[in-house]
Amino acid sequence: MKLVSRKLNRWNTLRFLCVIALFICSGPAAKAQEEEEEMQIPDSLVSFVEVERPFYEHVPDPGYDLIEDRISCMNNQIDITFNPRVKAFIDYFAIRDRDYTRMVVKRLQVYFPLFEKYLAKHNMPDDLKYLAIVESGLNPKAISRAGAAGLWQFMPATGRIYRLDRSWFVDERMDPEKATEAACKYLKQLYGMFNDWELALAAYNAGPGNVRKAIRKSGYQNGFWEVYEHLPRETRSYVPQFAAITYLMNHLEEHNFFLEEYEYQRLVKVDTVHMDRFMSLPVLEEKLNLCPGEISSLNPELIRNAVPEDAGKYVLKVPSHAYAAMAVQKEEIFASVEEKNEEAKKYFTRNEAGSTYNREKITYRVRSGDYLGRIAEKHDVRLEDIRHWNRIQGNTIRVGQDLTIYVTPKQKASINNQLAQADKAKSKPVAVNGSKVYYVQPGDTLWEISKKHGGVSVAEIKALNNLTSNNIKAGQKLIISN
């Protein structure tokens, strides 16, 4: 009987635990799980995978009320709204992916002084420096799936508005100083539109048009959380991420992130040198006995790891300890690496968009049915090359348009031979059943055909072929004479 009693007790205990579990799953925990499933993790986190933490690491979980109290005591210039959505992101950065937060902490001292300088220059809230963590994880070479780039993730079109130039060699969206100043100007403009920092941040992510649309749909409410349901899904996560990062960066030690435990990204004193000719950065680093990437890391905007030849007097950042050699021996250095530089320049020139290196110019007239991709394939060039040579922004071309194309000498000889044969075929009509027949070539008109076959007028060609208009098409058979 004692054995049976023990089994019954265990069974009753198990049933009790199941009831409790069912209650929890249908209550607040289930709601929290739904909120977590809606969390939109930023592009800068996509490559990070949560790893198992050492068993000895203590990960504090202060709880909702304590975090709310801490936020209420923060002396921030941008007010932070705290709610379960923000708490979910705090848990993500402080508990689930601590490795990402450690990585960001290592970079704080490299970029925050720069952000603080430009924010103060433009009289902007200092808290905006935390936005770059949400945008890029403080990686100046970050590129999103949508094509945004740099610390502040400027899209190409927005970058052009704020004079962040792009070329084959240089992408100024990745220049920390220029991009930071551009971000300050853009954020200031957005705040002027909405007079609310949370809405300005939402507009930075989704664009001001989407925020205005959300405001209209909400019945012209004025706050982020009032228009929240009408914003794009990514933007609904964007502002809570900013709030979570702002809180966490101000309470690192309370979450067991101690700055002294991390190896800072090496802070390098920097000087600048004006470069007036092409220079491969790996070649220069080797000549100056620097570590590979030491100059490249100071100039992330040089996306080909080279100073372009046509950049005027390019301001190149170099480590201060290498500046003396550059300043005193610059001409000698250029001379000693000229051969290696020339090899690198030829490689880049050959691959640069719109390059004419070792190519000859031809003119191609667009025919019916042509499109840029087909023309590029036919001439063995890239689509972006044709756009560059002809200053075409999109893909629109028209029949009869002349396109400039640069091809190899071998291709040009082959094209000239084909054209010569085509011209020969055009000038000789074929006899069919006693009549002279001509097959219309691409670009032909009745007037041109009549000129090539002297003595035959346009009216006669139309009469011989029962044509009611002057419209003809390539490949069409025309009787020239009986």
Image (cartoon, rainbow, N blue to C red):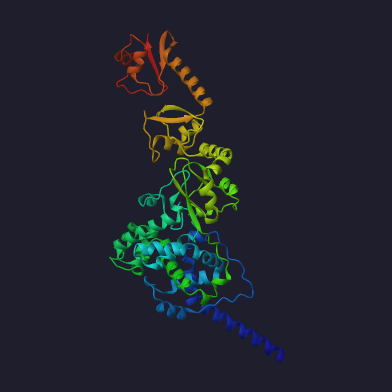
Q: Residue at x 51, y 69 (%)?
A: 93
* Quadrant of residue 455 within the rendered picture: top left
Q: Residue furthest bottom?
A: 2
Q: Is residue 34 visible?
A: no
Q: Residue at x 49, y 73 (%)?
A: 30
Q: Is residue 128 visible?
A: yes
Residue 175 screen position, x and y as percent: 45, 53
* Quadrant of residue 384 within the rendered picture: top left
Query: Horizontally, is 283 left or right of 355 in the view?
Result: right
Residue 423 screen position, x and y as percent: 44, 17
Query: Considering the image in quadrants, where does the C terminus appear?
Result: top left
Q: Is residue 432 above or below residue 69?
A: above
Q: Residue furthest front?
A: 328
Q: Nearer the viewer, residue 261 or 445?
A: 261
Query: Horizontally, is 215 left or right of 353 in the view?
Result: left
Q: Is residue 113 above or below residue 412?
A: below
Q: Nearer the viewer, residue 403 or 470?
A: 403
Query: Horizontally, is 17 left or right of 228 in the view?
Result: right
Query: Horizontally, is 455 left or right of 180 in the view?
Result: left
Residue 342 screen position, x and y as percent: 55, 37
Q: Nearer the viewer, residue 404 or 348?
A: 348
Residue 43 screen position, x and y as percent: 49, 59
Q: Is residue 376 above or below residue 435?
A: below
